[in-house]
Image (cartoon, rainbow, N blue to C red):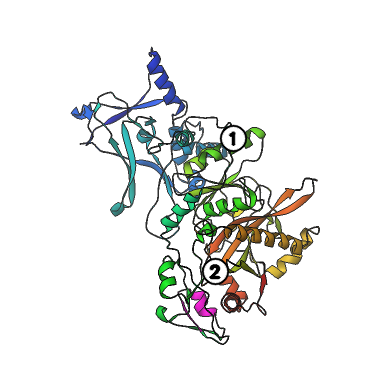
Amino acid sequence: MFGIMQVEEAEEEEEGEEEAAREEGRRKANPGGERCYKVIVTNENGLQAADPNSIFLVDHAWTCRVAHARQQLHQVPGLLHRMANLMGVEFHGELPSAEAVDQVLEEMWKFNQTYQLSHGTAEEKVPVWYIMDEFGSRIQHSDAPSFATAPFFYAPQQVAYTLLWPLRDLDTGEEVTRDFAYGEADPLIRRCRLLPWAPADLLGLSSCTPEPPDEHYQAILEENKEKLPVAIDPVARPRDHIFKVYTDVQQVLRHLTHPRFTFTRSEADADILYNFSHFKDYRRLSQERPHVLLNQFPCESLLTVKDCLASVARRAGGPAGPAWLPRTFNLRTELPQFVSCFQQRERRGEDNHWICKPWNLARSLDTHVTKSLHSVIRHRESSPKVVSKYIESPVLFLREDVGRVKFDIRYVVLLRSVRPLRLFVYDVFWLRFSNRPFALNDLDDYEKHFTVMNYDPEVVLKQVHYDEFIPEFEKQYPEFPWQSVQAQIFQAFRELFQAACAKPPPLGLCDYPSSRAMYAVDLMLKWSSHPDGKRVMQPQILEVNFNPDCERACRYHPTFFNDVFSTLYLDEPSGCHTTRLL
């Protein structure tokens, strides 16, 4: 059954005390700015009520990915004017003004809804945000809603709508409301989620984030569907043994040329399984083929998934985390603590730029820099995310063609075993640079705030080899010899892997004798101060990647995979471009 609804401005005359209180509550959670609107059921077309079998389609006024929002407001005719009117933002004139665009980009988090596609490329799976039309955007919040909504993507026409349906029988004249924190039962989390519409003071709440309980890690193991191996003894092989390698990693197939490794197309015949995807059933492998070596460890997601990385790192630095990891909150489990931290920093006048990242995506996909608390809270709805303190004072590198830009560094680390903990680092590191001078503005300017440029052919990719970078770095920062900076970086790696391997699985990496692994650790340097006021460079680990892209390593260092395999599988690091850390 289809009905018609109507938007009308709320009456403000002679309300009773109870109705006035309800109306005041609506105004506080009103996404329409100063003017309060009601959406009511009408009796047009003879439809005098809406029953639970009714369903309505609501159009979308604007659909975008966050990275493109500013550009669309500037370029799409009429979009800024419509959004400003819808959101109650003052807008005068025909041409988009920077001030009006900024206001709309801030206010949109009171109106945005989200969905993401389950199929397609990684880029196509990045969450989409949309704003319902003027009708849908006027529907107010209620803790006891009369309607519910859900996005509906109609694949044949590649168009999305919002489905709107009543939760109970409604009489003509009743208000249409929905729950802006639908499905959230925890009162504190609801309070946080509703904060964009109903301001709340969480300064009295502790922002402390201790390491999660053991049950948290057990739940991760079950969610990942990993089966831990049984105990086995290390397998001894003759020193002249030729290892049969089964792999689906093309860079290994093309560049591993060491005479003690040969490739096989039969997984059953392999001595080494070097897989691109994550292995799950370690138990069966340990029971049936304990001699087969792997390129991954059970429970290594504790390192390679960002929320787990932050949790494990607290073993080295306490609830706030170690100095080498930006302050990080899991938005699924630590939203109230983040809100309290944000508000405390705001009260103290401290920098409040943050970066939202998906738990388990690379290449800076769906990653956003913001100083808007509302934005962070709403990003929680799109996909599992962490929010980390954005590095507001990074060590910069002077590019003669651009100016002083951000850069990050990638090291490849090789984990030979957990017990004893044996860790190596490849002697060559790789650099990535932003393309525009750094400043704490234009937070959606990708080429100013991000460094991953090698996946867009239309973007300039600045390449500097490590042996060219070191003397130039020392020229720019003569008080900071690279050897001492790198020593701090390596100490951070030691502390991270010691923390990750300190507890038995699933609380730590599993001591499986047949496992080996290669990880890429991405980091930046930031300016910090010692208690004596001396300025220092502090490494900041950003993420740890499983099976990293080694295209540049293979192009410039043809022996890369020979060195990796010799160190991990032959126990012959001498003569390789690797350094033992532990």
Which residue is nearer to you in this view: 134 or 110?
110
Which residue is nearer to you in this view: 377 or 41?
377
Q: As displayed, is residue 10 above or below residue 350? A: above
The magenta-colored residue range is: 243-256
Q: Where is residue 59 drawn, in percent x and y?
A: 33, 41
- Where does the C terminus fall, quadrant-wise? bottom right
Q: Amino acid at mark 2?
A: Ala
**Mark 1 nearby-residue class (10 Å; few <14, some 14–19, many ≥20):** many
Q: Where is residue 502 drawn, in percent x and y?
A: 59, 58
Q: As displayed, is residue 24 above or below residue 371? A: above
Q: Is residue 528 left or right of residue 26?
A: right
- Where does the N terminus fall, quadrant-wise? top left
Residue 95 appears anywhere in the view: no
Q: As displayed, is residue 62 above or below residue 218? A: above
The residue at the point 73 percent across, 66 percent down is 470
Instruction: Decide whether residue 255 is among the magenta residues.
Output: yes
Between tags 1 and 2, which lies in front?
2
For residue 303, which quarter of the picture? bottom right
Residue extending farthest left: 46
Mark 1 vs mark 2: which is more N-terminal?
A: 1
Q: Total number of numbered labels?
A: 2
CA separation in Å, label 1 and label 2: 41 Å
Q: Amino acid at mark 1?
A: Gln
Q: Which residue is mark 1?
A: 343
Which residue is nearer to you in this view: 271 or 535?
271
Q: Is residue 124 left or right of residue 172?
A: right
Question: What mark, if any, has residue 277 been given in the picture?
Answer: none
Which residue is nearer to you in this view: 363 or 324?
324
Q: Where is residue 265 drawn, in percent x and y?
A: 42, 81
For residue 204, which quarter of the picture? top right
